[in-house]
Amino acid sequence: MRIATYNVEWFTNLFNRDDELLVDDGWSGRQNVTRAAQIEALAKVFVAIDADAVMVIEAPDSNGRRSTVKALENFARAFELRTTRALIGFVNNTQQEIALLYDPNVCRVRHDPRGDSADSHLPDAAPRFEGTFRMDLDTDAVHESIEFSKPPLEVELIAPTGRKLRLIGVHVKSKVPHGARSQKARVRLAIENRRKQLAQCIWIRRRVEGHLDAGEPVIVMGDFNDGPGLDEYENLFGHSGVEVVMGCDGSDRRQLFDPAAMETLSRRSALRPSTSRFLLQDRGVYMNALLDYIMVSPDLRKLKPHWEIWHPFDNPKCFDALELREALLTASDHFPVTLDIRV
């Protein structure tokens, strides 16, 4: 199977209120990119990666009027993709959902959330992801309430062989200190956001440990807005959220694995993988960052899967194919990550 994760910047802006594609010259959510141009580029990227299942981050909105599932299935139908079915879990109010677009002829999937009841108020309990996680963030003996603005999507996927996999699609809160009006406020908000982000990752890690304890193969995938060495606040807390979810402080037998994350963690190599490219407006330069991951449990790692980042400049296959390279740059500020695995 080929499983992918792909953050599509403001995918929701490409659909009207009836969840139909807006193929016109209106502006998309991407700077200086029309809706028609982004839609065409996305179609080329989805065709090129040819995945059996794609965890779509920033999927189209779902609310009382709009449907993530209908929009994604309309997109697939318009370009004759084989991933004709879509699945969503707990909806959110950010207009950026997490959804799985998949080929029903290859795999069967269902939303299968785990954890304590959503109204559990026990400190350090790991409730379902649409609930509230209570944890002491600042060692003042008071448990703060943590919630996901975008609850992770938990999927039971049945592969062609009948093997069951647990997928957890993630879009963790950004640590950017939005709204800060001074350097002091920026530092305070950055530290506060880092604490919340780490708490969310601890919550995800506890769910992972439950699957490991049950002997269930698990894949955690998506956009963490975080990674080893990404900002100056990592030293303050000792590790990144990515390391928390992977379980890097524990036994190798319980660690999740992602080769790009491990390459960055080693700090011995000049190679710095990246999955996203952003324009820093104040400096007029592009920044590359490793934000998107596909982490697998030890039992799946033994199957010797193959990871690939579809970076338009770092991946020769993408760079040498001019049409695909341009499509990747136009479609989103993130690039797909794929995992080929025999299950």
Image (cartoon, helix red, strand yellow):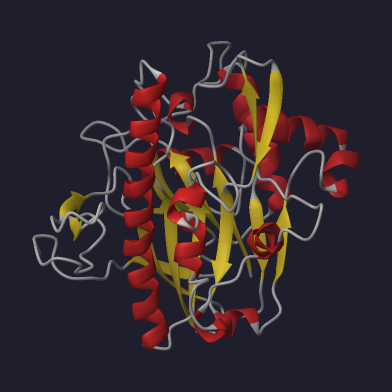
On screen, residue 317 versus residue 263, left or right, reads right
Where does residue 273 sit, x and y in percent of width and height?
73, 50
- Residue 139: name its quadrant: bottom left
Q: Give above or below for 26 relative to 173.
A: above
Where does residue 57 sit, x and y in percent of width and height?
47, 45
Where does residue 202 sit, x and y in percent of width and height?
35, 63
Q: Total marks drawn?
A: 0
Residue placed furthest toward the right: 320
Q: Give above or below for 200 relative to 284.
A: below
- Residue 132: name its quadrant: bottom left
Q: Is residue 13 visible?
A: yes
On screen, residue 292 versus residue 90, left or right, reads right
Q: Is residue 106 visible?
A: no
Q: Give above or below for 171 relative to 33.
A: below
Q: Residue at x 26, y 58 (%)?
A: 129
Q: Residue at x 43, y 88 (%)?
A: 215
Q: Residue at x 48, y 29 (%)?
A: 10
Looking at the rendered image, the quarter that the N terminus falls into is: bottom right
